[in-house]
């Protein structure tokens, strides 16, 4: 495609996206597609002759959009938000259009230095000490794996990197709470710990890591000749947004020489509010931390920021230094390929930079406060209604709720919950996700899409009354 064709078609694409976003709220938010619906409409073989880009645009409307759920919809209350502010979309577009690759500092100096600076901006915005160094990865899942590899190498004094799984020492153990994200289990599997060596520690009444139970588990493992290696704490768990007590976990980590990784994928964004920062008190004592600006903050997916306090250790673990990538200034610059798995690096910093500069930190904080207010408002409505129950403390912007009519219990309650949730989705007027808590289904209401205002939350509450009216 020539630059002139690109200029013409690019305007069409921008117009198409602007219309899509402007009208996002008018569509049914969840998707009713059945498996294979799109496949049945796609040619089995690629075109031999040019079809032109316009053909793609018309298929967007006819084939693609009908087979999508709309994540940027104001009635999106599912999972956690994945906000792609249009400023970040433009940053992402620029990054792709520049088509540069960070292999070394020299291969795209601005790519490395902008990433260095904007991750530091986010560090400052979040009230973190200046001892943290940031790097952008694809997802929190990858960050968890990198953290556990770094932990493994610290405990084995770089032994596992040298001799691999044959290092012949006692097994290493990872500790996380039962509420930790599934990516922690996956990270431990892939980092070579083995599922048998992931301890899922019980939680307290607030669904936060039970530190006494952790201490017991560590003692038991030590007495069995195993080697405790890492603790993974979560600030803002996926099911209920519970906060593990970071400072107390840091005490345990320090006492036993364990790596402390903090998964703050969702709630990290709230830390741009000074009033939320006590929720991760002690954070500067952790070894690694992940926050996902691609969730609530507004950076279009994917943009996960991984912070470490000892970047030299991380680089030593990941470094391979092949001759074809060596340059004369390597010792004066950051070489981000040694901070993770991938060699080639996208210019992801561009979209974080775009978001922060377009809005400024004050406006970003105002939006996050709006969402916290909306969640508190809905919590008040739920608590004031005798048939509804709030099943976990509402800490940020996610409510765990259930409608419990008198006499409906046990398996019947599970069926009842999933049935009314289906009725919600059938209306197309909201999208919520169910999850199990203490073995029973409940519904999560996650508030925080860019365009979700009080009126949308009020309409949701109205809808919940309608689908549960008898
Ligand atoms: C969303 C989330 C994850 C997974 O994030 P990805 O970036 O999709 O890997 C992990 N942990 C928590 C607490 C999350 O909220």
Image (cartoon, grey):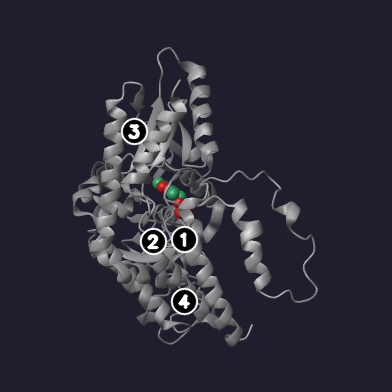
| Quadrant where the C terminus is found in the figure | top left
Alpha-carbon span between mark 1 and mark 3: 37 Å
Q: Position of residue 121 (x, y in %)?
A: 28, 68
Alpha-carbon span between mark 4 and mark 3: 42 Å
Q: Earlier in the sequence, mark 2 or mark 3?
A: 3
Mark 2 vs mark 4: give the one in front: 4
Secondary structure at badge 4 equals helix
Q: Which residue is mark 4?
A: 94
Secondary structure at badge 1 equals helix
Mark 1 vs mark 2: give the one in front: 1
Mark 3 surroundings within 10 Å by alpha-carbon count, few (fewer than 14), some (14 through 19), many (20 or more): many
Mark 4 surroundings within 10 Å by alpha-carbon count, few (fewer than 14), some (14 through 19), many (20 or more): some
Alpha-carbon span between mark 1 and mark 2: 26 Å
Alpha-carbon span between mark 2 and mark 3: 25 Å
Q: Which residue is mark 2?
A: 305
User: What residue do we see at 38% from left, 31% from top?
Assistant: 401
Q: Which residue is mark 3?
A: 207
Which quarter of the picture shows residue 299? bottom left
Q: Position of residue 402 (x, y in %)?
A: 40, 27
Q: Residue 21 got which mark?
A: 1
Q: Earlier in the sequence, mark 1 or mark 2?
A: 1
Q: Earlier in the sequence, mark 1 or mark 3?
A: 1
Task: Examine the rendered structure and indicate whether residue 156 appears above or below residue 353.
Answer: above
The answer to whether mark 4 and mark 3 are in CB contact below 8 A is no
Task: Examine the rendered structure and indicate whether residue 52 appears above or below residue 195.
Answer: below
Task: Examine the rendered structure and indicate whether residue 193 appears above or below residue 112.
Answer: above
Q: Is mark 2 within 8 Å of ligand 1?
A: no
| Quadrant where the N terminus is found in the figure | bottom right
User: What residue do we see at 40% from left, 14% from top?
Assistant: 406
User: What residue do we see at 42% from left, 77% from top?
Assistant: 111
Mark 1 vs mark 4: give the one in front: 1
Q: Position of residue 293 (x, y in %)?
A: 38, 59
């Amino acid at each position: 495609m020539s630059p002139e064709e690109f200029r013409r078609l690019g305007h069409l694409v921008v117009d198409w996206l602007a219309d899509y976003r402007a009208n996002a709220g008018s569509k049914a938010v969840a998707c009713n597609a059945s498996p294979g619906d799109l496949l049945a409409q796609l040619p089995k073989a690629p075109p031999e002759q040019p079809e032109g880009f316009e053909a793609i645009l018309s298929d967007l409307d006819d084939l693609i959009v009908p087979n999508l759920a709309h994540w940027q919809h104001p009635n999106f209350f599912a999972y956690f938000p994945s906000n792609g502010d249009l400023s970040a979309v433009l940053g992402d577009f620029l990054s792709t259009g520049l088509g540069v690759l960070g292999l070394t500092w020299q291969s795209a100096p601005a790519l490395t230095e902008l990433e260095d600076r904007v991750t530091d901006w986010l560090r400052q915005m979040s009230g973190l000490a200046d001892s943290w160094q940031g790097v952008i990865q694809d997802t929190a899942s990858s960050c968890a794996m990198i953290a556990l590899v770094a932990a493994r190498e610290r405990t084995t004094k770089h032994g596992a990197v040298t001799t691999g799984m044959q290092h012949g020492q006692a097994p290493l153990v990872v500790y996380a709470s039962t509420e930790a994200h599934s990516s922690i289990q996956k990270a431990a599997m892939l980092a070579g710990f083995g599922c048998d060596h992931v301890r899922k520690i019980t939680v307290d009444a607030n669904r936060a890591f039970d530190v006494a139970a952790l201490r017991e588990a560590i003692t038991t493992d030590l007495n069995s000749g195993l080697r405790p290696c890492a603790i993974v704490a979560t600030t803002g768990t996926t099911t209920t947004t519970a906060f593990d007590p970071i400072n107390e976990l840091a005490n345990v980590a320090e006492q036993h020489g364990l790596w402390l990784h903090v998964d703050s994928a969702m709630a990290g964004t709230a830390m741009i509010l000074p009033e939320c920062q006590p929720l991760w008190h002690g954070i500067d004592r952790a070894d690694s931390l992940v926050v996902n600006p691609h969730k609530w903050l507004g950076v279009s997916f994917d943009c996960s920021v991984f912070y470490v306090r000892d970047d030299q250790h991380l680089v030593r673990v990941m470094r391979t230094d092949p001759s074809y990538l060596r340059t004369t200034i390597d010792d004066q610059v950051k070489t981000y390929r040694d901070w993770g798995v991938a060699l080639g690096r996208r210019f992801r910093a561009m979209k974080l930079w775009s978001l922060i500069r377009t809005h400024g930190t004050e406006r970003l904080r105002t939006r996050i406060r709006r969402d916290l207010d909306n969640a508190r408002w809905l919590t008040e409505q739920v608590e004031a209604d005798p048939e509804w129950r709030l099943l976990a403390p509402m800490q940020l912007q996610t409510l765990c709720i259930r409608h419990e009519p008198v006499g409906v219990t046990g398996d019947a309650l599970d069926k009842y919950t999933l049935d009314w949730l289906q009725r919600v989705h059938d209306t197309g007027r909201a999208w919520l996700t169910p999850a199990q808590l203490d073995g029973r289904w409940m519904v999560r209401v996650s508030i925080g899409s860019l365009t979700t205002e009080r009126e949308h939350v009020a309409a949701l509450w109205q809808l919940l009354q309608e689908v549960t009216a008898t």
